Amino acid sequence: MTTIPVSPQPLAIDGGAPVRESFLPYGRQSVDEADIQAVVDVLRSDWLTTGPKVVEFEEAFAARVGATHAVSFSSGTAALHAAAFAAGLKPGDEAITSPLTFAATANCVLYQEATPVFADVTADTLNLDPDEVEKKISRHTRAILPVDYAGHPASLTPIRDIAQKHELVVIEDACHALGAEYEQRQVGGIADMTVFSFHPVKHVTTGEGVMVTTNNPQFAETLRRFRNHGISSGARQRQNAGQWHYEMVLLGFNYRLPDILCALGIQQLKKLDANLARRREIAARYSDAFRQIPGVIPPTVRAEANPAWHLYPIRLEAEKLTVDRARVFRALRAENIGVNVHYIPVHLHPYYRDRFGYKGGEFPVAENAYTRLISLPMFHAMSDQDTEDVIEAVTKVVTYFKR
Ligand SMILES: Cc1ncc(COP(=O)(O)O)c(C=O)c1O
């Protein structure tokens, strides 16, 4: 016999009044007048690209995350490609990464004609499980690419230990984790190379753009060359030295981040601490509220981590609900809450299924999490009222569908 759910409030998806009148996206940039002025100033200057703002942004960024070198790139994909190159990945090599990530993390391995090997995640943080990584090491393994899912740092100490034992390079995909801390240290100076994104939904934005940090001068030099056609010097360096001569020393690309965007990045970086504080405040309020709602599991934070909260992904306890994730998702959207899902596990995308024969079931923890995950709105410009609206909508919908 099916039970008819009873709720004091009809859901918007069934024609009831939505919790909000206007749509609240899951992420959004904040750009102020100082940001705009910084970009305008560059437009009036001599250098639109590869000029002084690039160096200024890179130096400020390296100092902020406690790394010796920072190298900017035009996108996360470009930066991951460069990091895979700098790590020496070549045909026949393998690199181990998480299936619960954006496809770009694994794709960079393919650009080098190497093979991405997935290892399952831990059920609490949904980050790479070091025990699973260890099982996937072969004589072809050359790198590990942990992902700081949602902004919670991966298990960097055990991963670095494995890397050291097997002489592997660690490329941390910290696209979600600018400002995160692990064992009291800033993410950015821990892995061999760390990749941070400046997409508009991130903590700091340049529209498109990314920074790779490293303490290894060799990696820094290779990264710089790779982003500039494999050329050994920049146009500005040559101009300053009164030189025209340059040499192409490796096969690189044009993956440069222009001065216009670096100027925006310099201004945005000044607001990182405030943005992080606000995200942490929202996460704390969410977690307080969601711990009280049966059917909802808030994200776990490990003792050694201070996450940057790029995302706030809840998991639904399907056993306690009468409907699946898709229905809850649609109901929340109807309440004008811009929920999202991060991520469809990479190995389940048609390209990976076709090329590598994945059928599903290979990574049970990641796959199970995927069926339950919903990312709630999380961005630093969210007001207290926005936050309360999300809590109200989740409470309304989940309570309605309670078993
Ligand atoms: C975890 C992760 N890795 C890589 C990327 C790729 O970055 P981009 O879109 O800048 O190429 C993203 C995108 O946001 C991401 O979230």
Image (cartoon, rainbow, N blue to C red):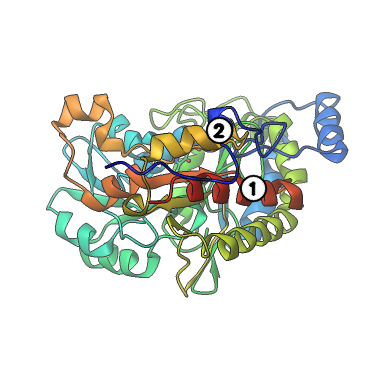
Residue at horizontal 74 percent and vertical 40 percent from the top: 30
Taking the view exactly as shown, the residue that stands out farthest to the front is: 1
Q: Nearer the viewer, mark 1 or mark 2?
A: 2
Is 220 placed above or below 206 here? below
Is label 1 in contact with label 2 (beta carbons under 8 Å)?
Answer: no
User: Can residue 350 be seen at all in this image of the molecule?
Assistant: yes
Residue at horizontal 28 percent and vertical 66 percent from the top: 164
Which residue is labeled 2 in the image? 333
Relative horizontal placement of residue 278, taking residue 298 as reference (left or right):
right
Few, some or many residues within 10 Å of mark 2 (<14, 14–19, 20+): many
Amino acid type at mark 1: His
Relative horizontal placement of residue 129, taking residue 53 as reference (left or right):
left
Q: Quadrant of residue 18?
A: top right
Residue at horizontal 60 percent and vertical 33 percent from the top: 234
Residue at horizontal 87 percent and vertical 34 percent from the top: 37
Viewer-proximal residue among 389 and 52: 389
Find residue 169 and name its label. none
Find residue 203 and name its label. 1
Q: Is the residue indicated by label 2 positioned so its CB lies within 8 Å of ligand 1?
A: no
